[in-house]
Image: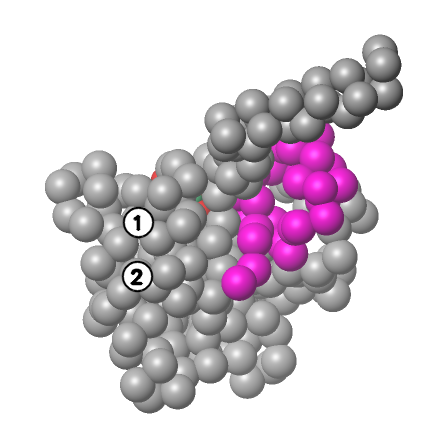
Amino acid sequence: MKFFIDTANLDEIREAYDLGVLDGVTTNPSLMAKEGITGQENIIEHYKAICDIVDDKVSAEVIATDYDGIIKEGLSLAKLDDKIVVKVPMIRDGVKAIKYFSNEGIRTNCTLVFSAGQAILAAKAGATYLSPFLGRLDDISYDGLDLIEQIVHIYQTYGFATEVLAASIRHTMHLIKCAELGADVVTCPLKVITGLLKHPLTDSGLATFLADHAKAAGK
Ligand code: G3P
């Protein structure tokens, strides 16, 4: 199972990378805006800065929504660095563009996925990664984890090569359930990754070990 961090914040990306468990980064236009990154040149420089931190798999999202625009933007993003994965929305022209990029050997991440039907289309088009947004389904009273389970089952049944990249993960239980369900990748905020560290019995057990050690050493 791969861990991606879902942020455009360079400090958070560095922190997750330093922990030694990071396999990639996902961004989106909202996350870039949150960091105050605006204007095409700044956005490009920011993608380069992210690529300088991590080893591989940096999702960079296209803004265009028409086929020619997505292809032009995707090709220029892919040229920035071998680590770039072109992130394309689940729309008609997006599916066509994913097929084009797949034929060209350019990795893609199909984003804004909310149904099994969309997942099948993306896999047929040859998407490298598929991003179902489970938190946003939970937000409207659908069970996002049900969708992850359904897509994993379909992909396994047919041997689709597309990897299920569970996105819009809001808390550690989302991540753990995705692991149980066989999601290939999770992308989540730093606090979800570091949240996995926490257990009160670890803290109290360590305190006891250190106190016993100090007592035995006569301190
Ligand atoms: O990767 C998709 C993610 O950024 C969306 O998360 O929390 O805005 O639904 P959220």
Instruction: Identify the residue shown where x is 77% and y is 16%.
Output: 215
Provide the secondary structure element on which disc 1 rests.
helix
Where is residue 211, by image quadrant?
A: top right
The residue carrying mark 1 is 134
Q: Is mark 1 within 8 Å of ligand 1?
A: no
Q: Is residue 7 magenta?
A: yes
Any mark on residue 148, and which?
Answer: 2
Where is residue 103, by image quadrant?
A: bottom right
How far, Cα to Cα, is label 2 from label 1?
8 Å
The amino acid type of the residue labelled 2 equals: Ile
Provide the secondary structure element on which disc 2 rests.
helix
Instruction: Identify the residue shown where x is 23% and y is 46%.
Output: 137
Closest to the observer: 122 or 184?
184
Ligand 1 visible in quadrant:
top left
Q: Quadrant of the C terminus?
A: top right
Q: Position of residue 132 (x, y in %)?
A: 34, 57
Q: Residue furthest top?
A: 219
The amino acid type of the residue labelled 1 equals: Leu
Q: Is mark 2 within 8 Å of ligand 1?
A: no
Q: Position of residue 32 (x, y in %)?
A: 56, 35
Determine whether, in the image, residue 52 is placed left or right of residue 68: right
The relative height of residue 93 versus residue 171 in the rendered view (above or below) is below
Instruction: Identify the residue shown where x is 40% and y is 83%.
Output: 160
Contact between labelled residues 1 and 2, with CB atoms less than 8 Å apart: yes
Q: Position of residue 134 (x, y in %)?
A: 30, 49
Badge 1: how crowded within 10 Å, few (<14), some, or many (20+)?
A: many
Magenta range: 1-28
